[in-house]
Amino acid sequence: MAIGRAVKNHKVGEMVGVTWINSACGKCEFCKKGMENLCENMKFTGYDENGGYAEYIVVADDYAFKIPKGFDEAHASPLFCAGIIGYRAFKLSAVKKGDKLAMFGFGGSAHIIIQVARYLGIETLVFTRDEKHQKEAKSLGAAWVGKPDSKPPYLFDSAIIFAPDGRLVPYALKNLKRGGNVTIADIYMSRIPELDYGLLYEERSVKSVANYTRGDAREFLDLAAKIPIKTQIREFTLEETNNAMLLLKQSKIGGSAVIRVGR
């Protein structure tokens, strides 16, 4: 690791992580409102700027984050994507201590956010079709688990949809308390079926997640160290990346896949 003369937040030898957001412009109307996650001129790591699968990357000081104490680089990796995005969805869900939170899908983000919810005194219900994932959810403290179309034992206060299946939206709304909200944590989702207005009535809402702010990242990483979050990973070499992607598509990886580049 090397640093430029103007760097203030880091020093040589520190372990840091770089997220999907490489930079925001700081000048558009959204950045000025503190909504940099909606920046009109955002640059993304591995898409607009070199990085992602690289051994070396150059990033601005304020877009690199210290890896929390107690984590090695491999187990910290899921925190910087699945964790931060999941945390943004968790915040938008407005769930609080004593509430009941439904989680649809149990991949990398859900494995992490269920630990956040439990730490903050929030009861979780997990909907997932995979029996292995159901067992994992139970082991991580879920109060109830079932398949995506299962009838829960009671209504929930909020829901986060991690699985990119639009059919889950009306189902989540159907089992949502008055005034609750459904938060969609996906960058892509299949078509949402036509909704009966009765599902939205009584001030229920549906919202999407678009990226996250640096504030979200810092809050979450601090919380990850306090809990502390235990990430479940399966490591692959760079040459095994295509196989890792296939296994993810087939839901055959518990937790998160980590690609080790170099060394």
Image (cartoon, rainbow, N blue to C red):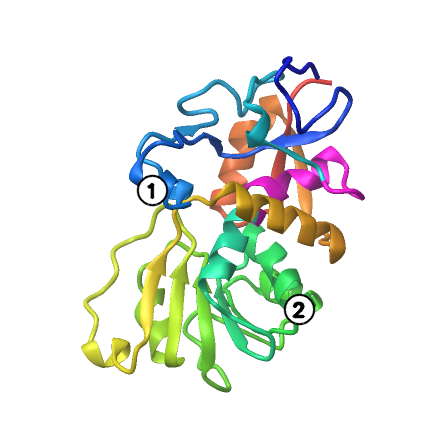
- Is any atom of residue 106 visible in this view? yes
Distance, label 1 to label 2, CA atoms, is 33 Å
Query: Is 248 placed above or below 94 here?
Result: above
- Looking at the rendered structure, the kind of residue marked 2 is Arg
Residue at image position (80%, 44%) is: 70
| Quarter assignment of residue 43 | top left
Q: Is residue 64 left or right of residue 229?
A: left
Depth check, mark 1 against mark 2: the one in front is 1
Quarter of the image for the N terminus: give it.
Answer: top right
* Rendering coords of residue 150 (x, y %): 45, 77
Q: Nearer the viewer, residue 58 or 135?
A: 58
Give the residue at mark 2: 118
Residue 81 magenta-drawn?
A: yes
Query: Is 210 placed above or below 58 here?
Result: below
Give the total number of marks visible in the rendering.
2
* Rendering coords of residue 129 (x, y %): 49, 64
Q: From which residue to which does the magenta span run?
A: 68-83
Residue at image position (69%, 40%) is: 76
Quarter of the image for the C terminus: give it.
Answer: top right
Q: How busy is the neighbourhood of tag 1: few (under 14 within 10 Å), some, or many (20 plus)? A: some
Q: Nearer the viewer, residue 117 or 172?
A: 117
Give the residue at mark 1: 30
**Tag 2 secondary structure:** helix
* Rendering coords of residue 253 (x, y %): 60, 47
* Rendering coords of residue 261 (x, y %): 64, 22
